[in-house]
Amino acid sequence: MNLPNVITELVQAQNTFDSTAYANCFTETAVVFDEGKTHNGKTEIKNWIDKANKEYQATMEPLEYSEAEYTLKAEVSGNFPGSPVILTYHYEFEDGLIRSLKIV
């Protein structure tokens, strides 16, 4: 699967529970929407993923990427009810980084 570099880095950071590397995939003013909550800016994103990593220990396996729609479907497994689940990640990019991420 031919993923943009920043998505490859994001998946690797998620799978190694590296919150700093995960946050570094985003612009300073990026926005993440997940589980009904919005996280604004790199610091909030780092705090959100750090808490999620500790709570859920979730890893992701990319299944399908749409370059036209900037979406990634991935199987996410971890310490949460219903695991594993297939989630869709909707991205917007800016200068090689993620400007916006919505997880549904």
Image (spheres, grey):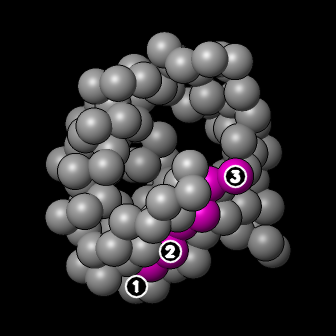
Helix or strand or loop: what does disc 3 sit on?
loop
> In front of the other: label 2 or label 3?
3
Do the residues under discs 3 and 1 have CB atoms within 8 angstroms? no
> Counting other residues with Cα less than 10 Å from the Cα at mark 1, is it few (<14), some (14-19), or many (20 or more)?
few
Amino acid type, label 3:
Val
Please provide the residue range marked out in magenta: 97-104
Of the 4 image quadrants, the one containing the N terminus is top right
What residue lies at 33% left-to-right and 30% top-to-bottom? 53
User: Disc 1 designates what residue?
Assistant: 95
**Residue 104 tag number:** 3
> In front of the other: label 2 or label 1?
2
Task: Give how far apart the Cα atoms at labels 2 and 1 are.
Answer: 12 Å
Mark sitting earlier along the chain (3/1): 1
User: Disc 2 designates what residue?
Assistant: 100
Q: Left or right of 66: which side holds 97?
A: left
Q: Is residue 13 magenta?
A: no
Task: Give how far apart the Cα atoms at labels 3 and 1 are.
Answer: 24 Å
The quarter of the displayed image where residue 98 is located: bottom left
Mark sitting earlier along the chain (2/1): 1
